[in-house]
Image (cartoon, rainbow, N blue to C red):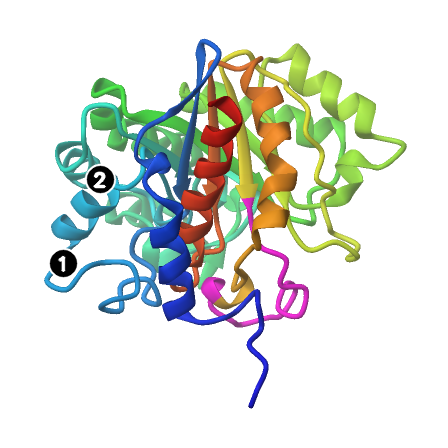
Amino acid sequence: MARVNPHDPGADIGRKRGEDAGDAAREPIRVGKHEVRFGTASWTDPTMTVPGVFYPEGVRTPEERLKFYAGQFSLVEVDATYYALPYKKMAETWAERTPKDFVFDIKAHALMTGQPTEVSRLPKAIREELPGELKEKKRIYRKDLPKELLDEVYRHFREALAPLTEAEKLGAVFVQFPKWVFPSNEARELILETRERLGLPIAVEFRHGSWFNEKNAERTVRFLQDNKIPYVAVDEPQGFKSSVPPVVVPTSEELAVFRFHGRNAENWEKKEIPPSERFRYLYDEDELADWTPKMAAVAKTAKQTHAVYNNCYSNYGTTNAREAARLLAEMQA
């Protein structure tokens, strides 16, 4: 009989663990005068929407799924905005379908962080204004765009999220820099420029460990603290050149963020695989418990703390979010 991988045991075991964890994640957990919210980085991944995996039978439409999810968690991250600029109508429906106190964290668009985007996924009004040689390209980068068109990207993004801002449901825009963005004056200026252009609260995640190596760690932390920019602490596979260490440091009194990518080292740097396969990893309770005191300590310094589980294969993220919430709630009891 084949041995079950404890970190990839399948949907049935994942669902059972999630049910056993209870409902502590439904509401923000109080740590002193502050709040900690738990959620996942998706509510629509195809491996998650399979009937019986996370959603009950009969919950099939986008509206039904978001309403059910928002009844289980107080937070969700939207990743689709990385690939395509959002539209106002979309944000209106998100605001309408979720409870008053629900919060959305939104991933910044690729062009805002030095990553490429497909020309075909840009809004028609922006595509039509592209210079001739850019219209013919499949992908373009931030550096390719004329200043006025880059301004339009930010304006479109900001105005599309207005319904969430007005409903007080926007947590932060996650500005995630790729592994080829190293510590430099240029990179730090880009972070400040992004915040200024957006005019929205941001949180920064790095994808290369050099930001926290012996040479740069102190300067990175000082830069974030001096500019009151929330840092996204990550849990991810270690041992790669790009691996970001699990640094936990408060950099803002308003917000702290934890993102859990799983520890699937085998798939971490594989090319051309779905995100759910890269993050296909179910944390065990000891691994989650290691982070509980760190969350509690940071939560005492920031008004809001967001714990986002990006291991969104099947029900792994939802299960771990519930379990981690229970662990923190038990610590506060």
Q: Is residue 275 shown in magenta?
A: yes
Residue 139 at what x, y percent from top left?
Answer: 47, 59
Q: Residue at x 44, y 64 (%)?
A: 138
Question: Where is 176 relative to 239, above or below?
Answer: above
Residue 28 at what x, y percent from top left?
Answer: 36, 26
- Which residue in the protein does label 2 denote? 71
Q: Residue at x 57, y 15 (%)?
A: 252
Question: Where is 293 relative to 118, above or below?
Answer: above
Image: magenta residue range? 260-276
What's the CA distance linking mark 2 and mark 1? 13 Å
Label 1 secondary element: loop
Between 100 and 252, the one nearer to me in the picture: 100
Residue 31 at what x, y percent from top left?
Answer: 48, 17
Q: Is residue 16 left or right of residue 332?
A: left
What is the quadrant of residue 211 in the picture? top right
- Which residue in the protein does label 1 denote? 59
Label 2 secondary element: loop
Question: Where is 250 relative to 157, above or below?
Answer: above
Amino acid marked by disc 1:
Val
Q: Is residue 232 shown in magenta?
A: no
Residue 151 at what x, y percent from top left?
Answer: 41, 29
Q: Dominant secondary structure of the magenta stretch?
A: loop
Q: Earlier in the sequence, mark 2 or mark 1?
A: 1
Amino acid marked by disc 2:
Gly
